[in-house]
Amino acid sequence: MPNDERSPEAQESASAGHVRVLVIDDEPEIRRAVQLGLTSSDFTVAWAPTGQRGLEMVAQWHPDIVLLDLSLPDMDGIEVTRSLRTWSAVPIVILSVRSGDADKIAALELGADDYLTKPFSMGELLARIRVALRHAAHTATGGTDASARFVTDGLALDFARRQVRVDAREVHLTPTEYEVLKYLAMHAGQVVTHRTLLRAVWGPSYDDEVHYLRVFIGQLRRKIEPEASRPRYLLTEPGIGYRLRSPD
């Protein structure tokens, strides 16, 4: 597929989908693969080969989600994320060859919703996009309906009653354990960094207390997981944080 800078409207006509996806990436191979996978799943796709063009298209085209490469010819994707988050809440999924924890943590803490390391499977990308879109819809509605309960496989949280059940069996959590699980449930399917989770539950003075968080995660797993050493629900993103399994 040739690199082009057609208007968003012209690019949109190539697909009949209703969800608008803006891909900010200058790699032709990635653009071809992502376009094929997304358009075949009825997404509408537009492209931007530079960070600056991507920022302009978010403002002009109002995409439902942004797929963002970190290595762009004119600016770093971390800076694009930082800039977007000053004026837009559009979901952002990072796509990058950078596998270092520092880049992932920086992008997530600046407001990216998820991070995929290239190469990735189209199935995984589609799953991450759908999770980010569900979370954005939940946030936009204030969570009035979706926040009443959270269910994934055999794990269920009733936020109104502060009850947790696993396979219909009530699990008794301490107040802090519940707050950790609740925060992860509110961001289910997304990576939550250690620092973000520590700040949300304990406050900014606990930013670096990762060992403290690991203790509570271990306690939670012993209570909610069928097999704590092989977690089904509460998954570790090594060196970064945790992800609670998304509802099926």
Image (cartoon, rainbow, N blue to C red):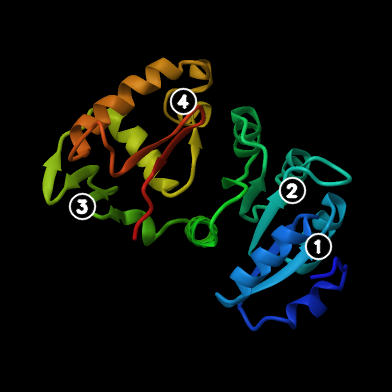
Image coordinates of residue 54 in percent, x first then y, are 80, 56
Asked if the residues shown at circle 4 and circle 2 are in contact, with their CB atoms under 8 angstroms apart, the answer is no
Q: Secondary structure at mark 1?
A: helix
Q: Is residue 19 visible?
A: no
Give amino acid for label 1.
Answer: Met
Instruction: Give how far apart the Cα atoms at labels 2 and 3 are.
Output: 37 Å
Q: How many numbered marks appear?
A: 4
Quadrant of the rendered image containing residue 98: top right
Is tag 4's residue or tag 1's residue first in the polypeptide sequence?
A: 1
x and y percentages locating residue 197 in the rendered image: 46, 31
Look at label 2 and name its amino acid: Leu
Look at mark 1 in the image and give the residue it sits on: 57
Q: Is residue 2 above or below residue 59?
A: below
Q: Which residue is labeled 4 in the image?
A: 198
Q: CA distance from mark 4 to mark 1?
A: 35 Å
Q: Are marks 1 and 3 in contact (CB under 8 Å)?
A: no
**Disc nearer the start of the sequence (2/3):** 2
Give the residue type that dot 3 points to.
Gly
Contact, mark 4 vs mark 1 (Cβ under 8 Å): no
Which numbered disc flags the more N-terminal residue, 2 or 1? 1
Residue 84 image label: 2
Whichever of labels 1 and 3 marks the residue nearer the N terminus, that label is: 1
Mark 3: give few (<14), some (14-19) or many (20+) Cα within 10 Å: some
Choose the circle earlier in sequence order: 4 or 3: 3
